[in-house]
Image: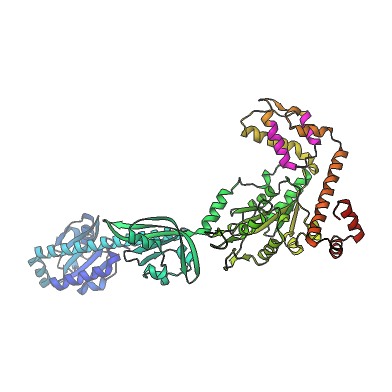
Amino acid sequence: MSLLGNIQKDVQGVAEVIAAALKVEVEILDDDQRVLGATGRARTQLMQRSEDTYINKYVLEKAQPFILNNPGKNRLCDPCPEKDICIYTAGIFYPIITHKCIGVISLISFDSIQKEILFTNERNFVDFIARMAEFLATKVLEYQMVNELAKSKKYLETIIDSVQEGIISLDQDSKIRFFNRAAQKILGLSLPEVIGKNSSEVLPDSVSAKSIIHGISYHDEEVIYNTPNGSHTLLATSTPIIVDDLIVGSVESFTEADKIFRVASRMTNRESILDFDKIIGQSPAIKKVKAKALQAAKSTSTVLITGHSGTGKELFARAIHTSSSRGKGPFIAVNCSAIPDTLLESELFGYEKGAFTGANEKKPGKFELAQGGTFFLDEIGDMPKHLQVKLLRVIQERSFEKVGGTKTISLDFRLIAATNHNLKQLVENGMFREDLYYRLNVIPLYLPPLKERSEDIPILLAHFCNKYSSLLNKQLKGVSVDALNHLKKYPWPGNIRELENVMEYGVNFAPENEFITMEHLPPYILESSAMTQESFGTRFQDQLQKSEKEIFETAINEHGNSLEAKQKIAENFGISLSTLYRKLKKYNLL
């Protein structure tokens, strides 16, 4: 559409005003020679394109006024096929100019009387239509400016609506003038509920209102906004809008405090992205478990990773997370054995302000921080039984309440658990809930100890030698043949974690540009060469007996030392009462 076409109603109005004032016929064309305003006989051409307006075309090209007093005789009329039977008797043509000529105002006559009126008042008429042309040019510029402002406003609104933070704008009277989509979503309020209302009605504690009152900015203020949808704890920033030293409004941005905690936790707990290709090993045993883990990553089911300490359970958990559909979400890990029983519940579930002594502020738990990602529960076998019940409920209902809270929070995370204990044995011994065990053991993943994948020992040694050579800025040739053969025979009770420590030790003590030899290995590794497999077996049996004694001690402490209690313990362990007495006597527990 042409520039004049955008204000066609104004153009027609101007044509009618000119006709009424000057008593002549009026025709106004745009730069496409379309008639946008017309009166009298010319009205029949309204909104049509005029193909034979040679005079108008000339004025559009030259952007200069033109007086026509001899239609058909003027040289500009020569191309016109109707020049000898022209219906016009005279005309005054005036250009409408903005940055270019955008149209023409024509005063036209169809008889001698109208022609006489035109030329009798020629100077006055030209001055008058010059002002009308200027008026139309101004209206076009106004339209363009308003249109640009509307586009800029829409552009700005689209940008603000696309951000994740809630944004509110108030005018000088603290009335809400803008409320973006994120603000609507976070606070659960619609535009009709807020626009035009005073912030004191909608958000009584709004920091943006404080900015208007005090004329200062507020940064990262923790505020609680109460709406019909509940209480919302937010971190808000507000700035007054000042024009010519007057406060004309304020703008506030905010986000959910819990969301900030989740992002902070994700950043502080972030490790290098780990996928299965970065898990070192080429043995059939490790290839098999990696293939199974990769298949598990495609699912959302719970995974239970078991294996000895140091076999890489958390590495596999991270690789499953990275390779899953939740790989871009948070990976939150909690070690049940590293947190005191009294603190583990609040660490997992979070707590509300005032939930207990010292709870001065609300805090999100690890469950909540894992939203949209993966929650890794390490050493699950060490979780206290009273928390096992609560974890079971979380898994079943996919929701929970914070300590001291009443609001139910829905959960959306993938659970991976790990342990170096035999959970099935713990279940049989009454130390782990059977229902929780089956909830966790949906996809079992057993990681073989290093002694079951000895083919990987040279590869792992080379990997960690390179790693610590780089970290310690040393150039080494690798591991000597003697040292390698010795390390391949070593049983590695601490598995990969122990092997890594041995290599870090060796890199520290090996000379620059030399091999790591036997003398650069930790002393206890060298002492192991004097040990026979029999001595390893004896040590293993000693460890088994020690664990058995601890199990019986735990049972006696839990059930008591009466005959009835011993009968119950024997029944739980699936042994006879006489066998139980022999075991208790053996370990001096009678």
**Which of the two residues, 83 or 315, is positioned nearer the viewer here?**
315
- The relative height of residue 430 versus residue 276 in the rendered view (above or below) is below
Res. 135 in view: yes
**Which of the two residues, 459 or 548, is positioned nearer the viewer here?**
548
The location of residue 507, given as percent across then percent down, is: 68, 31
Q: Which residues make up the magenta segment?
A: 482-506
The location of residue 2, given as percent across then percent down, is: 30, 62
Give the residue displayed 80% in from the left and 42% down from the top: 451
The picture quadrant where one finds residue 205 is bottom left
Locate residue 231 relative to residue 106 in the image: left or right: right
> Is residue 520 on the magenta stretch?
no
**Image quadrant containing the N terminus:** bottom left
Locate residue 252 relative to residue 29 in the image: left or right: right
Locate residue 167 relative to residue 490 in the image: left or right: left
Give the residue displayed 80% in from the left and 37% down from the top: 490
Q: How many marks?
A: 0
**Image quadrant containing the C terminus:** bottom right
Give the residue displayed 68% in from the left and 45% down from the top: 277
> Is residue 488 on the magenta stretch?
yes
The picture quadrant where one finds residue 381 is bottom right
